[in-house]
Image (cartoon, helix red, strand yellow):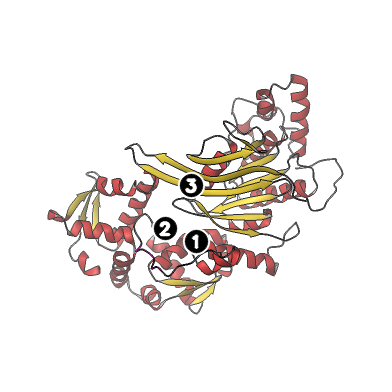
Amino acid sequence: MTTDHPRTPGPRPTGATIVWAERVTKTFTTPDGRELPVLDDIGFHLAEGEIVALLGKSGSGKSTLLRCIAGLIAPSSGTVAYRGEPLTGANPGVSMVFQSFALLPWLTVQQNVELGLHAQGVGEQERRERALKAIDLIGLDGFESAYPKELSGGMRQRVGFARALVVEPDALLMDEPFSALDVLTAENLRNELVGLWEGHEAPVKSILIVTHNIEEAVLLADRILVLAANPGRIQAELRVDLPRPRNRQDPHFESIVDTVYGILTGREDAAVAAVEPTTTGGAERPAPTPTSAPLPEVSVGGLAGLLEILVARGGEDGLAEIADELNFEIDDLLPLVDAAELLDLARTEGPRIRVTDAGREFAAADILTSKQLFAHHAASRAPLVRAIVQALAATDGHTLREGLFLDLLRRGFSAEDARRQLDIAIDWGRYAELFDYDSGDGELTLDPGAQDAL
């Protein structure tokens, strides 16, 4: 993204509220008539002069919240307002950048960029001038007549940015805008976006970005809202008081990343440190269920690999160090870490992860023994696996159709996520020789001796 205009760098003072949400709840209805809560009692605001990140795992409803703010969908209850006026349709003061680029393949770059202006009734000559200016701003001068198929992924996303910026919105909404790009292209676009924002060249007053990438949120945002999942709710809010461009090696940067990681992995002390204390009670937590403790989407081999790395490093290490060595983001390790903690094979302490005695035993075992150990941990500590084993054990013939479990899972998940949860459980159960699965008949059958693992 380039420009010939002089920069006037410096922090932007936050000003008037552009968008606010009050007690926003969103519930979808499944095909069988059940209610599926996605957002629960969300309240937040977006002000002039700030970048805010909505950060959360899958199932936290962050994209749904973004669409409520854009006015693309209405909340089930609560209010979303733009400049103090409750929305009754599309938000007139925002534009969006999507993960999938969302370009019309039969239109040229310039025609794609002009779409929003055409919808606003802007005349042909003004449309052309503003589109060419936006194309130049985002660094695609010379590609005005190209079609999307002729462009790389990074160039297509630049078109998406130009199309959003050309209408000069109050707020730019971005839904995982860099996640479909390769690492270098994504880093380049992030840096250029920061440059436009800091140079006051981007014709927007605020930015709201949805992401699952912790470092991306800390690199870009002035405030980070961390969403918990199932249903989505704001778990913590953190302010990032660092000058841009930000240095990943800065101890303050690393500290914020560690704090956010702690919140996302469920450590309450990290969440309490990031928000004002709330009323606490001494009541015991309810036992985890298949919907309150979903299975992380990992393979047993991947989990074993993480434990073997930890054992080789003396039993514990920092997550950032492990991620760097493997050329991953910390976020990529989260499902593996979640699975290891769920099965009590590892525990996290701040930004570090430590293998447990059970994890050491599992990592050192031969194949047969590792199966037996995994069977015990999965059947006793993974709620969905345990529920399947118990249901099969209580049934004559020890066989049940998958539809029973899918129906139960759809009480807390979408149909797609319910299927995904059951598939993970089937993979774990097959490896552990707890139960078998016939994909043709859609039946699960208990393996002999599986009840001994409970």
Circles 3, 2 touching at the beta carbon (< 8 Å): no
Label 1: few (<14), some (14–19) or many (≥20) C-alpha neighbours in 10 Å:
some
Q: Which of the 4 image quadrants contains residue 122? A: top right
Circles 2, 1 touching at the beta carbon (< 8 Å): yes
Task: Name the outermost residue toward the right.
Answer: 6
Which of pointers 3 and 2 indicates the residue nearer the eye? 3
- In primary-sequence order, the first of circles 3 and 1 is 3
Secondary structure beneath disc 2?
loop
- In primary-sequence order, the first of circles 3 and 2 is 3
Please tell me whether residue 110 is drawn above or below residue 298 in the rendered image.
above
Q: Quadrant of the C terminus?
A: bottom left
- Residue 296, numbered label: 2
Badge 1 is on which residue?
334
Secondary structure beneath disc 3?
strand
Is 389 a magenta residue?
no
- In primary-sequence order, the first of circles 2 and 1 is 2
Residue type beneath disc 2: Pro
Badge 3 is on which residue?
39
Secondary structure beneath disc 1?
helix
User: Residue at position x 55%, y 63% from top?
Assistant: 261
In the image, 31 versus 83, the foreground residue is 83
In the image, 78 versus 348, the foreground residue is 78
Q: Which of the 4 image quadrants contains residue 307? A: bottom left
What separation in Å lies between label 2 and label 1 (alpha carbons)? 9 Å
Q: Percent from the top left, x then y, of residue 94?
A: 65, 37
Q: Judge left or right: residue 13 versus residue 212.
A: right
Report the magenta residues as a range: 283-288
